[in-house]
Image: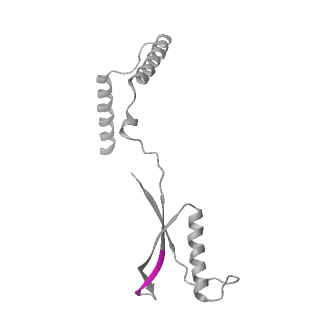
Amino acid sequence: MIRYEYKVRPAPTKGRKVKGLKTPEARFAHTIEDAINVQGAEGWEYLRTDILPSEERQGLTSSHTVYRTVMVFRRLIEENVPTPLEDVVEPEVAEEESTSDETSLETSEAETAPNDEPSEGDQKEDAAQSLEDHEATKEN
């Protein structure tokens, strides 16, 4: 799927002085051209220019609408989105990993003492006891 990201920049409102350009139209066009070329050098493609309303505060209690001219740019997002087939682990790889894990597990079990973990029943009793202790402290 093709995806784009967008960048919105305010359009220039005044032409800059440039050597060789005498008319206001030529200066303004050159300023717009520079703005587009700067973004293009960064990989952004010029898409369009829009005029959008912007509500701004005027004084302490009132507001008014100002229309802003913005330039819209876009560029392609090159992301490595895995396809459903890439998520599947091949059986050969999984078997090799599990075989090496089993071997290391057998070795570590032989070197360690028997399992000292509490049984499920012991864990339930401990949980019940801690709940009783908590309730007793709430009452006091």
> Does residue 46 lie above or below 79 as drawn?
below
Question: Of residues 136 and 57, which is closer to you in this image?
Answer: 57
Residue at image position (42%, 20%) is 98
Highlighted magenta segment, given as a residue range: 62-70
Q: Magenta span: helix, strand or loop, mainly?
A: strand
Q: Nearer the viewer, residue 100 or 87?
A: 87
On screen, residue 112 above or below 82 = above
**Quadrant in which residue 122 is drawn:** top left
Q: Quick one: quadrant of the C terminus?
A: top left
Q: Is residue 3 left or right of residue 27?
A: left
Instruction: Give how far across and how far down residue 89 sits, in percent.
Output: 39, 29
| Residue at image location 58% in from the left, 62% down from the top | 42
- Above or below: residue 7 compared with residue 23: above
The x and y percentages for residue 109 are 46, 13
Image coordinates of residue 73 in percent, x first then y, are 49, 67
Q: How many numbered marks have been drawn onto this rendered protein structure?
A: 0
The color scheme shown is one colour
Front in this rendered view, residue 62 or 81:
81
The answer to whether residue 129 is left or right of residue 93 is left
Q: Position of residue 124 (x, y in %)?
A: 29, 28
Given the current orientation, which residue lies at the most extreme top position?
110
Q: Is residue 140 visible?
A: no
Q: Residue at x 63, y 82 (%)?
A: 16
Is residue 90 part of the magenta span, yes or no? no
Please check the rendered image and state whether residue 63 is part of the magenta-colored stretch, yes or no.
yes
**Is residue 115 shown to the viewer in this render?**
yes
Location of residue 29 by image quarter = bottom right
